[in-house]
Image (cartoon, helix red, strand yellow):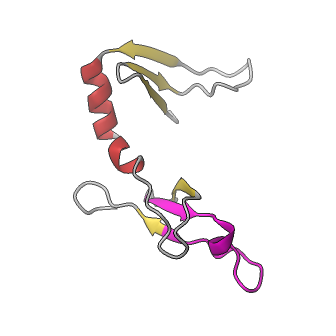
């Protein structure tokens, strides 16, 4: 299952495979659960606090940042501010910074 998780108001958790914009002919599921303890544990398991603290770009100081994941499952911040994105040749030179989770492992 390609899971989607939404935690709303620190008590309501929506989890499943459903894309909210899916076509009508897909077979997907979405379960809604309520419970503060479960919501907190899920946020902790998914490293939510770490992912909400996006750092400023060390090159330009900008905050134009997106969260990405490589094919090897390593999460990273990608800075896409125009100052950092475009090199002298006009090609993308976006700065990337790996995110360290689980006590130092990526």
Q: Could you tell me residue 22's position as x and y percent?
A: 70, 26
Magenta-colored stretch includes residue 75? yes
**Along the viewing direction, whichever of 48 and 26 lies nearer the viewer:** 48
Question: From the viewer's perspective, is residue 4 above or below residue 47?
Answer: above
Question: Which quadrant, please, contains the C terminus?
Answer: bottom left
Q: Could you tell me residue 13's position as x and y percent?
A: 41, 21
**Along the viewing direction, whichever of 31 and 90 lies nearer the viewer:** 90
Question: From the viewer's perspective, is residue 7 above or below residue 60?
Answer: above
- Res 100 → quadrant: bottom left
Q: Residue at x 25, y 54 (%)?
A: 102
Q: Bounds of the magenta span?
A: 74-96
- Res 63 → quadrant: bottom right
User: Given the current orientation, which residue lies at the most extreme front position?
Assistant: 61
Q: Could you tell me residue 43's position as x and y percent?
A: 33, 35
User: Given the current orientation, which residue lies at the most extreme bottom position?
Assistant: 88
Task: Determine whether, in the image, residue 40 is placed left or right of residue 64.
Answer: left
User: Given the current orientation, which residue lies at the most extreme right position?
Assistant: 90
Q: Residue at x 54, y 19 (%)?
A: 29
Task: Determine whether, in the image, residue 8 is placed left or right of residue 93.
Answer: left
**Along the viewing direction, whichever of 87 and 73 lies nearer the viewer:** 87
Q: Residue at x 56, y 58 (%)?
A: 65
**How many numbered marks have been drawn onto this rendered protein structure?**
0
Magenta-colored stretch includes residue 84? yes
Q: Could you tell me residue 33's position as x and y percent?
A: 39, 14
Question: From the viewer's perspective, is residue 8 above or below residue 53?
Answer: above
């Amino acid at each position: 299952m390609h899971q989607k998780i939404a935690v709303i108001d620190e008590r309501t958790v929506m989890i499943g495979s459903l894309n909210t914009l899916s076509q009508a002919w897909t077979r997907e599921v979405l379960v809604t659960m309520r419970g503060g303890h479960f919501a907190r544990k899920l946020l902790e398991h998914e490293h939510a606090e770490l992912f909400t603290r996006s750092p400023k770009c060390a090159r330009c100081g900008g905050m134009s940042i997106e969260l990405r994941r490589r094919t090897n499952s390593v999460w990273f911040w990608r800075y896409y501010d125009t100052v950092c994105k475009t090199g002298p040749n006009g090609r993308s030179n976006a700065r990337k910074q790996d995110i360290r989770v689980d006590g130092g492992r990526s």
